[in-house]
Image (cartoon, helix red, strand yellow):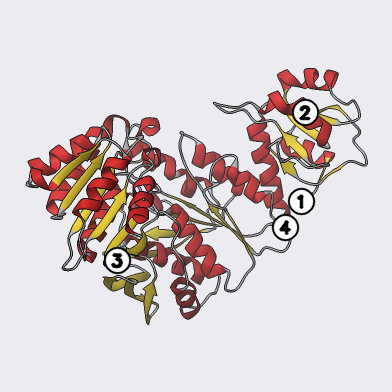
Amino acid sequence: MTFTIEEVLKATGGRLIQGKREGVLFRGISTDSRTLLEEELFIALKGTRFNGHDFALEALKKAGGVIVEEEKAREISWNGDPSKVVIAVEDTLRALGDLARERRRKYRTPVVAITGSNGKTTTKEMIATCLKTTFPVLKTEGNLNNLIGLPLTLLNLTEKERVVVLEMGMNVPGEIRRLTEISEPDVALITNIHPVHLEGMRSIEKIKEEKGELFRRMRQDGSILVNQDDPLVVELARTFLGQKISYGIENPSDVMAKEIQLKEEGTYFHVSMEGEELEIHLPLLGRHFVLNALSAIAGATLFGIPLEKAKEALEHFRPFPMRMEYKELPGQIHLLNDTYNANPRSMEMALETLAEIKGEGRSIAVLGDMLELGEFGEEAHRWIGRRVSELKIDLLITFGEKTRILKDSAIHHGMKPERTFTAKDHEEAILWLDQMIREGDWILVKGSRGMAMEKIVEGLIQRRS
């Protein structure tokens, strides 16, 4: 990527404090002074635990120039190399987004944007996998889905790519609106709407309104993919003026799945679309992954990719680490590692998968706290405890302060106390598991990122290998 000073000033509305206007070409944008390269433009961002302005002078020694906020601009220019470019803006984070939007407009490459409470990353990867069968694709790497990561992804856009697939996360009000302004999507998808990050949003209605900004702020002559099984998504889609392609399992849709079966080697289902029907073997465990796959098929059709080609791509899709990752341990012990994160709906879906897949074996749930739920936290843990009992999970191990509520709720709704255990740390959970498991058992390990539940998975594998 290259930018002239004029392009930067036009995109950001910034002021050139020092440096020449002519003959300077920035060969990249960086927000990290540690990896900054010569001739790149450094943008000094501010966060809750860092301030890029603290490193701006050092960055100016390596970079072709810096973008800083107005209050710091004079200080940087007085103390830095006078031959280097210093640009002042009101807000450096906004400037980063504005530069990314300018890049997006320059190439006019179709953009697919994905948000939702659960399944964003898997859906993004499935859609990109289907599209890659036909087009060069630029996509969000990992979960770089925020007001820094998404612009940095767009800034990598070149004339080579034919489609961009972007994931949009949300932690604070207004984030989806701004990400939509930056990316100007042609195609959009809200996977689902469930109670997550309630510390910042307070209510499911607020989450719906914030996620709905994607449909409201995108191009109204674009296209949206609608999860027909999520009533809140359906409600948001009603006012969209452009093309709609629906997908679902429970409700009539343009792209539908039926005859879903879970087996050790993955999830099997039949997909029907426009009179065509095919069986697909998805190498992931869980009915919820079927909805992700249906959205990918729906998206692929928008770009002229036939169902057979989408099927082939999805059958070669590989799960991400710590997202219902399956591993068989010696002694026919089946382990489901779903430790990447947790919220009430994802926890419930994982437990439903465990209950369905266990067959003649026992089901063992090792559950950690669900975090960032605010006032809804106690209610959410009580609900999951009830579901543990209703799904007839055979053994329950809890880890964390909040899961004590979950355990008490499971017992209150009929689970025998002797089938539950509260671990004081990861090691105690590992030891208890190692003593209790037997041939044919299915074990689910899940909790929020902050609970580091993967340590239990790693410890059990080490003991059993």
For residue 361, above or below residue 230: below
Task: Kindly identify the amino acid type of the residue bearing the numbered disc 2.
Answer: Glu
Mark 3 neighbour density, 10 Å: few (under 14) some (14–19) many (20 or more): many
Task: Residue 18 in the image: state x and y as whole percent.
Answer: 87, 26
Q: Earlier in the sequence, mark 4 or mark 3?
A: 4
Q: CA gap, disc 4 to disc 2? A: 29 Å
Q: Earlier in the sequence, mark 1 or mark 3?
A: 1
Task: Kindly identify the amino acid type of the residue bearing the numbered disc 4.
Answer: Thr
Residue 58 got which mark? 2
Q: Earlier in the sequence, mark 1 or mark 2?
A: 1
Q: Which residue is mark 4?
A: 158
Task: Kindly identify the amino acid type of the residue bearing the numbered disc 1.
Answer: Met
Q: Earlier in the sequence, mark 2 or mark 3?
A: 2
Task: Kindly identify the amino acid type of the residue bearing the numbered disc 3.
Answer: Ile
Mark 1 neighbour density, 10 Å: few (under 14) some (14–19) many (20 or more): few
Task: Residue 362 in the image: state x and y as whole percent.
Answer: 17, 60
Mark 2 or 3: the one toward you: 2
Quadrant occupied by the C terminus: bottom left
Q: Which residue is mark 3?
A: 249
Q: Earlier in the sequence, mark 4 or mark 2?
A: 2
Q: In the picture provided, is 346 more to the left or to the right than 104? A: left
Mark 4 neighbour density, 10 Å: few (under 14) some (14–19) many (20 or more): some
409 or 269, nearer to the observer: 409
Q: In the picture provided, is 71 more to the left or to the right than 130? A: right
> Pointers 4 and 1 in contact (CB under 8 A)?
yes
In the rendered picture of this protein, how many numbered marks are placed on residues? Answer: 4
Badge 3 element: loop
Q: Which residue is mark 1?
A: 1
Badge 2 element: helix
Q: CA gap, disc 1 to disc 2? A: 23 Å
Mark 1 or 3: the one toward you: 1
For residue 84, above or below residue 284: above
